[in-house]
Amino acid sequence: MFGRRWTSVLVILAAINLTSCAQIEDPCKTKARIVADDKYCDKYWECDNGQSVQYDCPNGLVFAGKHRGVTEGCDYPWRSNYCEYPKAQINPPIGTEHCDWLYGIFGHETSCTRYWTCWNGTATEQLCIGGLLYNENAHSCDWPENVDGCQKHPLCNEDPNGNVPLGKSCNRYWQCQGGYPRLQRCPAMLVFDRRSLRCVVPPTEDCDIPTTTAPPPEEEQQDARQGQHQKRPSNDFQEQQQGRTRPRN
């Protein structure tokens, strides 16, 4: 009984507040039946049983629009123009281990090649591959030259612009550029020589003449993943959208 009365009071107050704010469009009169708050980017209004009710986005996210964002119509504040001045986030951050907010992407405390993705306060460690580093401004893996204040990669400690063997591979190797490694492949019919650290005509001490058969599928898949990260850095965050729980204000 008390819960229903309290909900009714909230709905009435919300309706009064909505009426007093001319900037807020009545969501019950819109096709989407949901509108952004006029002052706070982490709040929005939705038509609920014919009444306008205010909701909060999950902690750390801001309203992006119906069927947009990572969950419940809410997204990360740095994407697009979801939270531009004079709008601001009104709800304070709720922090957990490795997470400044319950939802978000945050830099690692001790590593430039790792970062944390936080979902409802649970942190998952992620790794930037292909010689990329985590860029806190872009919230994603990025080319080293775009990341200030990070140490050089340990693979390139001996020679910041040299080549480094890649495991036991005969045709792939790391090429250091300014202290950061990038995956490379020798031209056709050449192999990587571990002594001279360059691509040469086979055979070498470790590699025979390469065959014309296709490489194993797992090697091709690994190369494809490496290539994707080199062409287009990304944050590798799986956007989960199950288990909706919306806090009413």
Image (cartoon, rainbow, N blue to C red):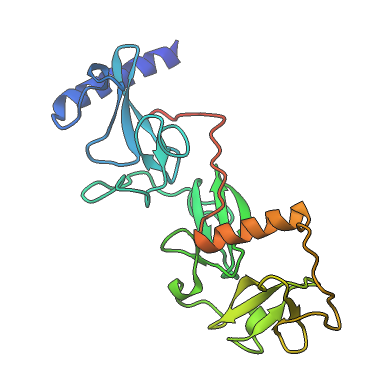
Q: Is residue 44 left or right of residue 241?
A: left
Q: Quadrant of the C terminus?
A: top left
Q: Residue 176, relative to residue 49: is it above or below?
A: below
Q: Residue 2, relative to residue 72: is it above or below?
A: above
Residue 89 or 164: which is nearer the viewer?
A: 164
Task: Determine the residue positioned at 69% across, 70% down.
Answer: 188
Q: Is residue 162 left or right of residue 76?
A: right
Task: Determine the residue positioned at 15% across, 32% down.
Answer: 23
The x, y position of residue 10, in whole percent, is 32, 21
The x, y position of residue 147, in whole percent, is 46, 72
Residue 193 or 116: which is nearer the viewer?
A: 193
Residue 130 or 171: which is nearer the viewer?
A: 171
The x, y position of residue 125, in whole percent, is 63, 56
The x, y position of residue 160, in whole percent, is 59, 86
How many numbered marks have been drawn onto this rendered protein structure? 0
The quarter of the picture where residue 5 lies is top left
Q: Residue 92, relative to residue 159: is it above or below?
A: above
Q: Is residue 189 left or right of residue 2?
A: right
The quarter of the picture where residue 119 lies is top right
Q: Is residue 204 left or right of residue 154?
A: right
Q: Quadrant of the N terminus?
A: top left
